[in-house]
Image (cartoon, grey):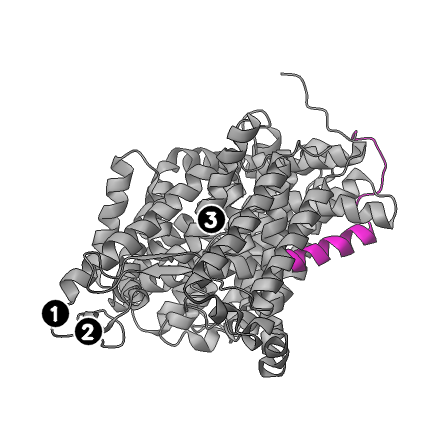
Amino acid sequence: MPEFKPYIDDAADIAEFSLKAVVLGALFGVLFGASTVYLALRAGLTVSASIPIAVLAIAVFKKLGKSTILENNIVQTIGSAGESIAAGVVFTVPALMFLSNGAQYFRYFQIFTLSLVGGILGILFMIPLRRALIVKEHGVLPYPEGTACAEVLVAGEKGGNLAKMVFSGVWTAIAYKLLMSVFGLWKDTPEFVTSRASQLPNLTVNSEITPEYLGVGYIIGPLGSAQIVAGSLLSWMVLIPLITIFGDKIPSAMLPGWHDKLISQMDPLEIFKGYVRYIGAGAVAAGGLFTLVRTIPTIISSFQGSLKDLKNAGQGGNRKRTERDIPMNYVLWGSLALALVMAVLPQFPGKFPATLVMSLMILVFGFFFVTVSSRIVGIIGSSSNPISGMTIGTIMATCLIFVAMGWTGDAYQAIALFVGAVVCIASANAGATSQDLKTGYIVGATPWKQQLGLIIGVLASVSIVGLTLFLLHNSPYGPIGSEKLSAPQATLMATLIKGLLARELPWGLVFIGILIAVFVELLGVRSLPVAVGVYLPLATTMPIFVGGMINPAVAWWTKREAEAEGEISSGMLYSTGLVAGGSLAGVGIAVLAGVREGYFARLLNFGQKINAVGSFGAYADLVSVAAFAALAFLLFHAACRKGPR
């Protein structure tokens, strides 16, 4: 096999780690970190940020002056850390709100430190794996987002207008959100619920018609979006009506329930929270474990390869520019120092030296799952990385170890979550790091500069992630755990920890969820997406499904093949703009609602002043559907255009 030649030759001496690249990358890290917190809290989903950041970097530098391809690469490297850090934090840290004595650790300092330690560990643990996974297996592991991002950078170097579609999506999403959520011209969630007297009582069909969900659906495609909505349809069209039919005849409250209410007194959302979400928790846990078991051969081979590479890390003498990593002694001592920080800080749960057990688990599970994550994303991409499954495995193993040691009190719940949180953040960031290093390998970047840039990206993004989390928690969308900020993964982690350590889990409902996942697997379908749908509100998954169906509709209309995530096309670029614009607008609206106790939000809500929604009467839901259909048509129209040049 011929030796690979990067786009920029090893001997080339061009600008790379410049101040303007670092500053712009940090800015994008903050923006995409904040938008990912919003998206992950609401939908439990994230999308890769590398490609849109690369496109935007090229556009911004064209306005400001010249830039090199390596500077553009540094921008997307630093900026992409925000998305992965935010995902890891939101999937775990909000669980503190639902654990015994956990709320006392839901503070900015603790969240900042967890994000910092997990994010940097993910980078450090990935460094010794770079040569094994990125270089030696260049023709084997495609790293779809990393390769696509490199194509974007090369296309930008040659000229073109990639950013136009992204910005078009951003401004469309912002305008739509302003009209709907600020001016209040139409309902944000059209809904149909059957009466309790019907043959299918409490059957619910609703949809939160936001641009970010529409864009996410287009990106993940028809199959993924259909699997997710199938799970939600099972919950809201089968399980909730079934519980209503039988529960209406029960004269007493049935545990776990909702605030001691009779089932006959509950609305569909209360039945969902009181019973169905435990079924969903069991399904997601089982789906995550199925995903983990399915990747065991990959796990073993990746772990063996990484150990071999660690042994050879010190060999090689003077390496080329494109082969130089951060020195291994920095990696080892840095990892140990970060783990020790977790053990000695008094603001964290537990007491020293018992907290050394927590640090040891973080190092062992962290390196193990960073290895797994770094290889898996090379095959299926970052957005499909089963981070939830890895975190579930970490938390279950941690809790079982605690039970074996007799650590079952309330104080140990937060410790178990801290282990899972750091491992989750590290694994998520390692996956993004792998894609970035793949991009750098293709374009001819300097590895140690990229790795340093990733650390800067972590430092920039962790400052905003915690702030955004608190902002949304205290906004009209909140609190975390409510319908608007369901935080599905974090709620699941809390449910697992309490069930294993405090034995508070309604195991009957959980086992039903596990069996649902088993049945789905027996049908030959991957159970995790369906299980996530069971756990999420239908209002969240329905607009994602609509976006997913636009993808094959475009393929049918244009006679092109359906687009896959990671492709560079008009539809994909416009959709990333919808996701970024909708999410950032959501954060901005939350800020607006919090200023002067919502004074400006009420001032701008023209729809409420003229009773816009009320004036539509029985047609209010149809007006909302029409507005969303118009947005969907704009996406369809944009996607039908020829690819960007």
Residues in magenta, as a range = 9-32
Q: What crowding class fits label 1: few (fewer than 14 Cα within 10 Å), some (14-19), or many (20 or more)?
A: few
Q: CA distance from mark 3 to mark 2?
A: 33 Å
Q: Amino acid at mark 1?
A: Ile
The picture places residue 191, in percent across and down from the top left corner, at 39, 60
Q: Tell me what residue is drawn at x 63 percent, y 74 percent.
A: 604
Residue 390 visible to an observer of this rendering: yes
Q: Amino acid at mark 2?
A: Leu
Q: Is residue 12 magenta?
A: yes
Secondary structure state at the residue bearing disc 2: loop
Residue behind mark 1: 250
Secondary structure state at the residue bearing disc 1: loop
Q: Amino acid at mark 3?
A: Ile
The picture places residue 456, in percent across and down from the top left corner, at 69, 56
Secondary structure state at the residue bearing disc 3: helix
Residue behind mark 3: 544
Which callout, 3 or 2, points at the residue further toward the start of the chain? Answer: 2
Q: What crowding class fits label 3: few (fewer than 14 Cα within 10 Å), some (14-19), or many (20 or more)?
A: many
Q: What is the tally of numbered marks visible in this picture?
A: 3
Q: Quadrant of the C terminus?
A: top right
Q: Tell me what residue is drawn at x 68 percent, y 54 percent.
A: 171
Q: Nearer the viewer, residue 251 or 533?
A: 251
Q: Nearer the viewer, residue 65 or 129?
A: 65
Q: Quadrant of the N terminus?
A: top right
Name, please, the residue furthest toward the right: 65
The picture places residue 84, in percent across and down from the top left corner, at 56, 52
Q: CA distance from mark 3 to mark 1?
A: 36 Å
Q: What crowding class fits label 2: few (fewer than 14 Cα within 10 Å), some (14-19), or many (20 or more)?
A: some
User: Is residue 560 shown above or below 263?
Assistant: above
Residue behind mark 2: 262
